Amino acid sequence: MKRVVLKISYLGTAYHGWQVQPNGITIQETMQNALEKMYKKRPDLTGCSRTDAGVHANEFYCHYDTDQEINERGIVLGLNALLPQDISVLDAKYVDSDFHVRYNAKGKNYIYKIYNKELKNPFISDRALHIARPLNIDKMNEFCKEICGTHDFYGFSSSGRTVTDTVRTIKECFVYKDGDEVILSVTADGFLYNMVRIITGTAIAVSDGIINPYDTKEILKSKERNRAGITVAPHGLYLNKVFY
Amino acid sequence: MKRVVLKISYLGTAYHGWQVQPNGITIQETMQNALEKMYKKRPDLTGCSRTDAGVHANEFYCHYDTDQEINERGIVLGLNALLPQDISVLDAKYVDSDFHVRYNAKGKNYIYKIYNKELKNPFISDRALHIARPLNIDKMNEFCKEICGTHDFYGFSSSGRTVTDTVRTIKECFVYKDGDEVILSVTADGFLYNMVRIITGTAIAVSDGIINPYDTKEILKSKERNRAGITVAPHGLYLNKVFY
């Protein structure tokens, strides 16, 4: 058996997230359907993360094992021909059989896109959150500095979390303007359930003057979910990079 | 009665074009639904052009008459709140009652977007045509120069055309690269049914070496539809500007 790692990219709008589930089409299932058509066998497929319904990925890794040797370029072109237009295979690589896309990930970078103009843009509506009022990027960056470092992010995660250790290290977090978009970028060794969406919701509350950025450490310490900002909608969130 | 002109923008993916029809939801109908909710009366609504199913508009104008005076900003914000995310009202203006969005249009600019990389991009798939092989922009521009001017475009239109006079004047036509996209821009006093999609299909055939750009005038003269290129898919086409 040989292990193959795929680098993929997808628009999450039409999917109920990565992970196979009974009540909706997922990216994992759609990928497995394409792999089954190519290999005439349905492989197990392990993803680097569980993205939620509506969340996108500029870069996402998954792996499977096979005893059929198709060359790497053949895998990329074959799967792309079999997949729908909203999922693309960017690369395929044979790796050592002990490599694991989730366990070997040293960190991840997520971005959250906000379209920050008064009138909505029909070409952006399922790819960024629309906020009509002007955002204060300097204030948002004050909060981003405070959230960096090693903290217990219990209060910045939702009740659906599946882990007990809620300490994570944010290596980098900042907000920048890109045309009409305001983008929050956050890099960490790992993320809790809804963590990026709550960090973004808190950064917006700081911009609006509802939360003081210098209360961030105290809010973290309190572990009270209701002291942080809201969980913003999934359609602005992108898994952007995975570090191995 | 006062006449209102709306400047709107829309993603055409979910619609069966502009014009109301029995078998699918259209932009005209969706706009009329929103107007009816705001005015408690369903106005007639005249569009500047009939875009086809799946075609987008960066800029599109329509007008209606009303005896209720809502201020211009109120019309914009009110309609945007009532419209779905893929249609945006950019502006509203009261105009003289003899102004007509179709008859007063002096010209239009369309663009056709091609995503020109080997692997598909899931974020572009319903907004640009994907062509994996490299396009020859210089050759496409040789064709664009030949197609400019006043010609009978009968052979560059489809059989669904509703007019008998098929002479039009192309004022400007050129192809340029924008990041990973190749964009064809064409400005004319008017367009026949499918004309931009056939011009783009012909430019691609010229790039591929199937059609000689210097045969363009002869192909025009022949009025034979099958001597021009194919009608490319609607999802790369944008009504980009309307000149009054």
Image (cartoon, coloured by chain):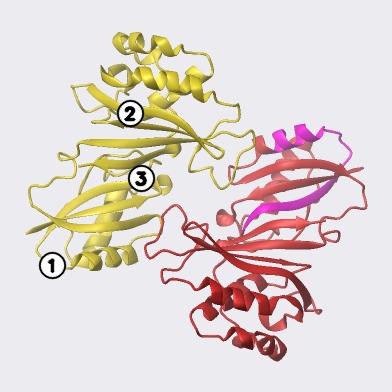
Chain colours: A yellow, B red
Disc 1 + disc 2, Cβ < 8 Å = no
Viewer-proximal residue, B119 or A226? B119
Is A33 displayed left or right of B50 in the figure? left
| Identity of the residue drawn at 50% across and 84% down | B209
Query: Closer to the N terminus: mark 3 or mark 2?
Result: 3
Q: Chain of mark 1?
A: A
Q: Which residues are magenta?
A: B56-79
Disc 3 + disc 2, Cβ < 8 Å = no
Residue A181 image position (x, y, % from top left)? 52, 37
Is A203 displayed left or right of B183 in the figure? left
Q: Are marks 3 and 2 on the same chain?
A: yes
If the image is split into quadrants, where does the N terminus of chain B sit?
top right
| Identity of the residue drawn at 62% across and 78% down | B143
Q: Disc 3 designates what residue?
A: A57
Count residues near mark 1 (Cα–Cα under 10 Å), then give few for <14, some for 14-19, many for 20+: few
If the image is split into quadrants, where does the C terminus of chain B sit?
bottom right
The amino acid pointed to by label 2 is: Glu
Residue A146 image position (x, y, % from top left)? 36, 17
**Is residue A23 among what the camera can see?**
yes
